[in-house]
Image (cartoon, helix red, strand yellow):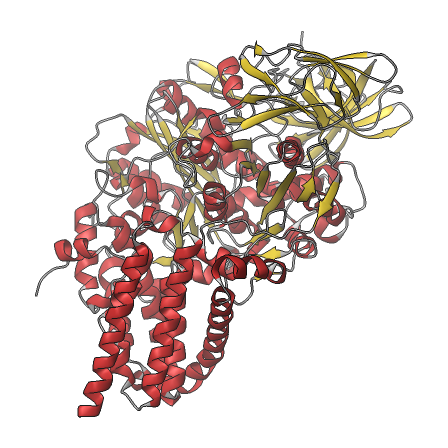
Amino acid sequence: MSGTITKVSGPLVVAEGLADANVSDVVRVGSQHLIGEILNMTGDRASIQVYEETSGLGPGAKVVTTGMPMSVELGPGMLDNIYDGIQRPLPEMRAAAGDSITRGIDVPALNREKRWDFVPVAKPGDKVGPGDVLGTVQETSAILHKIMVPNGIKGEVVSVESGSHVVTDVIAVVRDGKGKEHELTMIQRWPVRIARPYEKKYVPSRPMNSGQRIIDTMFPIAKGGTAAVPGPFGSGKTVVQHQLAKWSDVDIVVYIGCGERGNEMTDVLMEFPELKDPRNGEPLMKRTVLIANTSDMPVAAREASIYTGITIAEYFRDMGYDVAVLADSTSRWAEALREMSGRLEEMPGEEGYPAYLASRLAQFYERAGVVECLGQDERRGSVTAIGAVSPPGGDISEPVSQATMRIVKVFWALDSSLAYARHFPAINWLTSYSLYLDTLEPWYTEQFGEAYMQNRTKAMHILQEESELQEIVRLVGQDALSPADRLTMETAKMIREDFLQQNAFVDEDAYSSYAKQFRLMDLVLRYDAICREALDKGVDMNALFTIPAREKIGRAKMADAKTFAADYDAIEAQMKKEIAEVIAGGEDA
Amino acid sequence: MIKEYKTIREIASPLMVVEHVEGVTYDELGELELPNGEVRRCKVLEVEGDKAVVQLFESAQGINLAQTKVRFLGHPQQLAVSEDMLGRVFNGMGRPIDGGPDILADAHMDINGLPMNPAARAYPAEFIQTGVSTIDGLNTLVRGQKLPIFSGSGLPHAALAAQIARQARVLGDNETFAVVFAAIGITFEESEYFINDFRRTGAIDRTVVFSNLANDPAVERIATPRMALTAAEYLAFEKDMQVLVILTDITNYAEALREVSAAKKEVPGRRGYPGYLYTDLATLYERAGRRQGKKGSITMIPILTMPEDDKTHPIPDLTGYITEGQIILSRDLHRKGIVPPVDVLPSLSRLKDKGIGAGKTREDHAGTMNQLFAAYSRGKDAKELMTILGEAALSEDDKLFAKFADEFEKRYVSQGNNTNRTIQETLDLGWELLKILPRRELKRIKPEFIDKYLPQE
């Protein structure tokens, strides 16, 4: 079925003669077979968004529909790979077309030549349905890829083929109830705009460990939860996203670079193969799928990249894995939506964004969650979705930030004034929040005792008090404060500088285990408690603030991950001794 | 065979509608021939059926609808490139205006370029010594980076950019170096300032100038930076040169874009700029970089004047989201007589971390950099408090920080436009200033570096 172009305006093409095409079909446009997707139909006229540059296209050129909606190929070969927004592998595009992205390049998403060692799990005669595992493939050293029965197929296994196969080989035959035999390969296709099905959804109840102190201790996110990282430029959004991609205790990370800098993707590509997962020692790249639609790549594919990423994440979730999707940045995705909406001459909503912005965003984040997967073994998997938001001028009253805040449960608000003072991660502790605290508290208590969350509450209280005291200091000066208030200010400073600040570029500090986070916070709060007692005895506060152990506490976060417990014990002992000396000295005088 | 049309139906500068066209494609370059023989350029923005919406690059003055001929050339706008471009001056559309001959083209390149495959990029990591302490020490520039200067009307951004162009070099390296300079809607005097500076230092022979001055057609400005970047790509990736691109002033570029967008009656985004301003700017800025297996590189310094010194204005805001940091100039420092008036705290280089440290600059670089930033920030807070409550309200430590902030501005930031400091000098100066502070406050530096580098009494 083919039609003819009547209008070209940037990435929007209108073609007529496409009466047989369906809305959302993928079409091939012009002699270069550019990839496009049908947005609207009026009679036999279709409005098409083209995922590649349309320069050189004119009326009269042919448009052919594939009859299929925008889909991704799912199967072994996605990990350790980097795709563009419509799942074309970038290294292979480079091999085919050179350093630049030219048009009409056609490369399959999954390598057709690479052989995988298929180990069957199902046996002939087994009754299987959607989601049941037919067999496994060791995709990378870190991840066992489960080949599942695709949706819509149910019946009895006729045969399975173990051994070395390419993805297009038939690895199993299933006979359905009507006696029809289905030949199954390692590839599944799934339309990106539709969420993959699951058995049942659960409320998230376990935290995702990120190794970032302000996140894990102060504003934790649950596995299967949603979070937003809004911030003006230069506030460290990307570093936060990279840290999460590096250290989160999930099985798979899908990192979507949506309309961002090319060099940032290159950075991930160069760095992740070198970095080791702190849990199993495998290179991080072995568990990572990258989707890169950089800001100079065609805008329509940017809109698709978010869906491509989350669909891949859902597929790994269906194997029973914990997956994190990091989207940087959802604002660029929203702008792509706005641009297409403008060209379609739709009635604009707020700030030119289409009226359906909020519902599209909600659809994206709602694909996160903890689920019981399809299949008989009742395995559970999760997708955690974390989106960066880039509000113009850092002002979160704009539509994308506001629509996002209505959906997500965790909000890590980045603050440019913190970034200017080189306080990183520049997550503001007063404006950020996590709505998972209540559901996660039992887990923290079970693992580390009640002190963990009590300490958190105490620390938040001190920080809150500090911001009130600062108001007073600004009006009347520090001398007006009582010694107890001065101590609060001092402890708050320690919490900020010695606990919350974390340097992503120093190996010792980039990742903190829960145990280390707990002990470090405990150290600071213990100092506060002992000093408070001493102040009650009338000891001079300045002597307490300048004990040599303070410098040690200041450097405590650099302690080695293996020996920190002993180090902290030593610092604590020194601190107690020095304060006792100050008290004794005060009494002598 | 190229067809000629005499079917212009409508002109509303800078747009024009041509009817009864055949085989015209999106983004195609066209030519108008006026009855007096004058030729002007245009490009196709939209085609619908046999109607083409065309954007003029020059003024519409004198065009007669019935007698003006339009030709479509069958390709997008191109630039004739060759190594002979070095030392030459072109107008904003790429035609020589220095009285010299036309360029004998080695190739014709599409000025829109192509997006670089992220898998083909090489990560910028080579330290460029600019000789300016606030850049080398605190906001380090690396090869292949795009680092804009955010300035305001009346601030000396030209002097800083010229200083960087004059002094920038990669340590221990003798590769061929070239400058591509694009004047986008700036005044004759400002443009001459740069060209004279290139001439004075002899850099002019290694410089390609594209000049669209304030009185040249505004719409031409949309093409000018693309011309410059196409020349830069040719020199960097075909001829292995290390290219520094200076684009000034991006604000004028964005305004030209807004003019065309308004004429097309598009739904405006913030402050009347088109919704695709981000994407459009990205297609310029992202052309900076390095490629794997290629020797050359494009380092870009775009300059923009922030309207009302407002960093949240769409032009600086969107630029900041694309570029790898920014150098911000401050009016306060300028008034205080600090040269160059770089506002250190909001300035940033995102790529510095891979370009500094042992083997590149010095092992203590990262720690001292963070310490200087943090100390200056605290010192400024202390000074603010002091102006409200008087010096007595400050703690002993805060008094030291306030003193540090003053000395830092006076000695570290204000180095003048003719001082070329080596990175060692910059780092040592940093240590000398840190001496003002109590040692226990130097928490961001490893103790062994403090022992090694902190000057003794």
Foreground of the two, B201 or A466: A466
Q: Position of residue A274 (x, y in %)?
A: 37, 32
Please, is residue B216 above or below residue B391 in the view? above
In the rendered image, is residue B371 in sight?
no
Q: Quadrant of residue B389?
A: bottom left
Q: Position of residue B100 (x, y in %)?
A: 38, 22
Left or right, B122 with respect to B170, comes to right
Please, is residue B98 above or below residue A170 in the view? below
Residue at coordinates 33% horizontally, 23% vertically from top-left? B295
Residue at coordinates 21% horizontally, 57% vertically from top-left? B430
Residue extending furthest toward the top = B1
Q: Position of residue A301 (x, y in %)?
A: 64, 30
Residue at coordinates 65% horizontally, 53% vertically from top-left? A408
Residue extending furthest toward the right = A43
Q: Position of residue A444 (x, y in %)?
A: 53, 59
Q: Quadrant of the C terminus of chain B?
A: bottom left
